[in-house]
Amino acid sequence: MFEKYLPAGWTLDELIMLAAGIAVASTIMAVWYGLVAPQPARRRERLLAQRRAVLKAERLAQPERQRLGSAQSFAARVVERLNLIRTQHGEKSQSLLMQAGIRSRDAIVVFLFCKIVLPLVFGLGVFLFVKLTGVWQLKPMTLMALSLGATVLGAYAPELYVKNLAQKRRKALQKSLPDGLDLLVICAEAGLSLDAALIRVARELGPSAPELSDEFSLTSIELGFLPDRKQALDGLAQRTQLSALRSVVATLMQAERYGTPLAESLRVLAGEFRTERLLKAEEKAAKLPAILTVPMVMFILPALFIVLLGPGILSVIDNLSKMK
């Protein structure tokens, strides 16, 4: 019965075995990722330690010898040979990775290598899969268009993935910033310096807001090692590309330069950001009825009509059948 709907050369038993294999593999992966819990705190500590070592080496005028991965890394050799990092695209990619919170030394190498390799892998993979398996009987032009679409998808897939990570990170920073500023106000009123306040706030925010804790920790490290404190504060704004943090950086620079009261300025900013967050939540709540209209029409109203009108329709059908 179902044989005519199956791909050419496939049987129903083979399709059931394939589905069962995919289900078993998915279950194993889900159990694996559920049992092996990630440890983002250790990863952040390792990256911060690497950044501290780099800044210390630069401060001592003994810059570390940075190579793109190990000497045996094929990806590093390809990126070095094509000289991709020193181009304008490499700088934009580095900035995008920083916004996503990816600061590993080899991250830019892996990203640029994926941008080169994935189009070929996606395009050739789709072409060979259709040709060798014979799942779809496609015309040559259709197959060529499908392979070209897969190639374009492979070219943009790494950038879309990193942009998605950066967008999620900015939302997390925006959400946790008012609480972080409140803690900074408390530390400033207690008499702590800016460096000590950032370190203390980063330690307190580690479990609840790891993104903001990471940025404050890195800023405190750069404040201690970079010769110009303005450069360290500018780095915070450039890494996040968030307007709220730009305002915080401007306030911190003003306090550093003119000696204005830091606690009062940060308290005002925290109140503004919290009010802005509340207004955004109210805006989303106001949009909710319009958003729920389509799901209600498609899923709730048909079921409601069946429950209300179903017994009456069945009763009418029974009465008409008796009349016959």
Image (cartoon, rainbow, N blue to C red):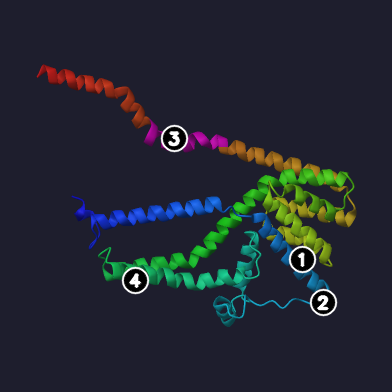
> Which residue type does callout 2 highlight?
Ala
> Which residue type does callout 3 highlight?
Thr
Q: Does 187 lie within the magenta span? A: no
Q: Residue at x 85, y 48 (%)?
A: 262
Q: Decide which of tag 1 and tag 2 comes sooner along the chain.
A: 1
Q: Which residue lies under the disc numbered 3?
A: 293
Mark 3, secondary structure of its residue: helix
Q: Decide which of tag 3 and tag 4 comes sooner along the chain.
A: 4
Q: Which mark is residue 323?
A: none
Q: Which residue lies under the disc numbered 2?
A: 61
Q: Decide which of tag 1 and tag 3 comes sooner along the chain.
A: 1
Q: Which mark is nearer the camera, 3 or 4? A: 4
The answer to whether residue 254 of the structure is visible from this angle is no
Q: Which residue lies under the disc numbered 1?
A: 52
Residue range corresponding to the magenta coloring: 285-300
Q: Decide which of tag 3 and tag 2 comes sooner along the chain.
A: 2
Q: Which mark is nearer the camera, 1 or 2? A: 1
Residue situated in front as seen by the camera: 49 or 27: 27
Q: Decide which of tag 1 and tag 4 comes sooner along the chain.
A: 1
Quadrant of the drawing holding the C terminus = top left
The answer to whether the residue labelled 1 contacts the one labelled 2, judged by CB atoms less than 8 Å apart, is no
Vertically, is 7 above or below 67?
A: above
The answer to whether the residue labelled 2 contacts the one labelled 4, judged by CB atoms less than 8 Å apart, is no
Q: Which mark is nearer the camera, 1 or 3? A: 1
The answer to whether the residue labelled 3 contacts the one labelled 4, judged by CB atoms less than 8 Å apart, is no
Whole-number angstrom distance, CA of label 3 to CA of label 4: 44 Å
Q: Does residue 149 appear left or right of residue 168 in this picture?
A: left
The part of the image, by quadrant, that contains residue 68 is bottom right
Mark 4, secondary structure of its residue: helix
Q: Report x, y in % for residue 166.
A: 60, 57
Q: Residue at x 79, y 42 (%)?
A: 268
Q: Residue at x 63, y 53 (%)?
A: 169
